[in-house]
Image: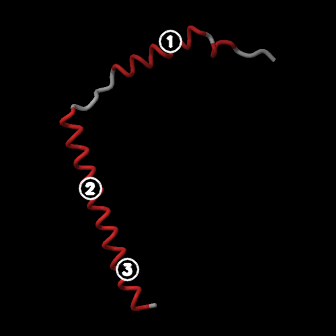
Amino acid sequence: MSKDNKTSSPSLKRSWFQELKGEFAKITWPTKNALAKKSTVALIVSIIVGLLIAGIDMLLKYGLSFII
């Protein structure tokens, strides 16, 4: 039972890391301004959804109080 050494050779590992470094170089990171805008939008949407869920919960509690 011989193990295939092609997958664990140092040259393939080095090649993989070089390709990984090349892929990281292609990444376009957002600017601080764009990041701040998107974070603000995400925060506002989260608050709105939270308020919506809380409102529905209160309505259900109110409605179920008549049934029970």
Residue at 28 percent of width and 59 percent of height: 47
Task: Bin the neighbour count of mark 1 within 10 Å (Cα to Cα): few under 14, some 14-19, many 20 and up.
Answer: few
Task: Please provide percent x and percent y for residue 57.
Answer: 37, 74
In this rendering, the label closer to the viewer, 3 or 1:
3
Residue position marked by numbered label 3 in the rendering: 60
Residue 36 as seen in the image, left or right of residue 49? left
Q: CA distance from mark 2 to mark 3?
A: 22 Å
Q: Could you tell me how many numbered marks the image carries?
A: 3
Residue at 18 percent of width and 36 percent of height: 33
Badge 2 element = helix
Task: Please tell me whether residue 39 is drawn above or below residue 14 in the rendered image.
Answer: below
Task: Bin the neighbour count of mark 3 within 10 Å (Cα to Cα): few under 14, some 14-19, many 20 and up.
Answer: few
Q: CA distance from mark 1 to mark 2?
A: 43 Å
Residue 18 as seen in the image, left or right of residue 41? right
Residue position marked by numbered label 1 in the rendering: 15
Q: Which mark is residue 41?
A: none
Q: Quadrant of the N terminus?
A: top right
Residue position marked by numbered label 2 in the rendering: 45
Badge 3 element = helix
Tell which circle, 3 or 1, labels the residue nearer the N-terminal end: 1
